[in-house]
Image (tube, helix red, strand yellow):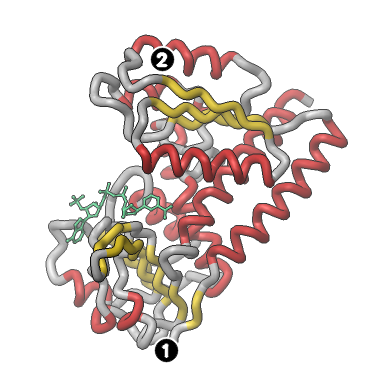
Amino acid sequence: MVAEIIDGFAIAAELRRDIAARAAEMKEAYGVVPGLAVVLVGDDPASAVYVRNKLKATAECGLRSVEHVLPANTSEADLLDLVGKLNADPSVHGILVQLPLPKQIDADKVLGLIDPDKDVDGFHPVNAGRLSIGLPGFVPCTPRGSQILIDRVLPNLAGKHAVVIGRSNIVGKPMAQLLLQKNATVTIAHSKTADLPGLCRTADVLVAAVGRPLMVKGDWVKPGAVVIDVGINRIEVDGKGKLVGDVDFASVAEVAGHITPVPKGVGPMTIACLMLNTLDSAARRIAAES
Ligand code: NDP
């Protein structure tokens, strides 16, 4: 193997320790404990695992979390009512509504009601707009975490070409915005892009956020490139479930300079950045009120 592994697991643990230290200072200086409200609607098992991991990280970082678990048949009106109450609650600095929501609920409507100043997921149109025009706001956690990993191994992106595969509002587009802010020359690829392998071979930084197991192969990658694998896909190997990314790790690690593994790459950074956004939210409120 040629590539050096970017250890997202260890870097996220370091970040959580730093957040815990800053949260303790905040409590000491201002008597404020950043609070995260997590709303889970229904009984999707994957969502329950994600929420559990987020709550665990909150406790580890010395932040406060409040979990609201609602039944799968919750009406849109009831969920909107809860979000309204959380918006008005001064002890809540961040609101996270776990997706997906049951089909009777319009997710855009719910996410659009979250106070942009408590939108720690960074999905509100106001925060998407702030990111695109370079104003401070909340950046979605997965791209924020991925950018921290890239900064570790390639801090200066001026003159570099970054290719982001995927144009979702929660990963691909904000990732491209962050890379652009860092002075990379950015190309966003998607399912209608021609000659994707050829395009990827021109990338100094390649971010795969697609949802297609092992799609990016070694011969798609420029020697020495930084490869960030956002994908989380469950596949069957010898009758057993296995988590893999969008990148074929075995062949790409023979060519790339740096690569994130799956699991223990981008995933832990996403959760750490949720904590970071919640801490930032509390810090901004303190600054605004003082
Ligand atoms: P979406 O399904 O919203 O977006 C996928 C994107 O990939 C779309 O833009 C789509 O193009 C593009 N795409 C699909 N097929 C191809 C193809 N054959 N060639 C090129 N582009 C293609 O997914 P998300 O952005 O939400 O998530 C992407 C992956 O990241 C998933 O595996 C998800 O599980 C994972 N994820 C991981 C997180 C983490 O913490 N590590 C957090 C969030 C997501 P088009 O727009 O044309 O349809």
Please state, as top left, top right, bottom left or bottom right, where the C terminus lies in the image: top right
**In which image quadrant can residue 113 be found?**
top left
Q: Is residue 117 visible?
A: no
* Frontmost residue, 225 versus 238: 238
- The residue located at (36%, 86%) in the rendering is 255
Question: Could you classify mark 1 by the number of other residues whose Cα lies within 10 Å: few (under 14), some (14-19), or many (20 or more)?
Answer: few
Q: Is residue 112 visible?
A: yes
Where residue 264 appears, as percent x and y from the top left, is: 49, 64
Q: Residue at x 45, y 43 (%)?
A: 49
Circle 1: element type: loop
In the image, is residue 82 above or below residue 94? Answer: above
Whether residue 88 is situated above or below residue 153 in the rendered picture: above
The kind of residue tagged 2 is Leu
Where does residue 69 sit, x and y in percent of width and height?
A: 47, 24
Q: Which mark is residue 1?
A: 1
Quadrant of the rendered structure where residue 106 is? top left
Q: Quadrant of the N terminus?
A: bottom left
Residue 6's x, y, as percent?
Answer: 52, 72
Horizontal and vertical percent position of residue 214 = 26, 69
The residue indicated by pointer 2 is: 80
Q: Residue at x 58, y 39 (%)?
A: 55
Indicate whether 278 appears above or below 162: above
Side of 207 where 142 appears, left or right? right
- Numbered badge on residue 137: none
Q: Nearer the viewer, residue 264 or 90?
A: 264
Mark 2 or mark 1, earlier in chain: 1
User: How far apart are the alpha carbons under marks 2 and 1?
Assistant: 51 Å
- Furthest residue in direction front, as rendered: 239
Q: Amino acid at mark 1?
A: Met
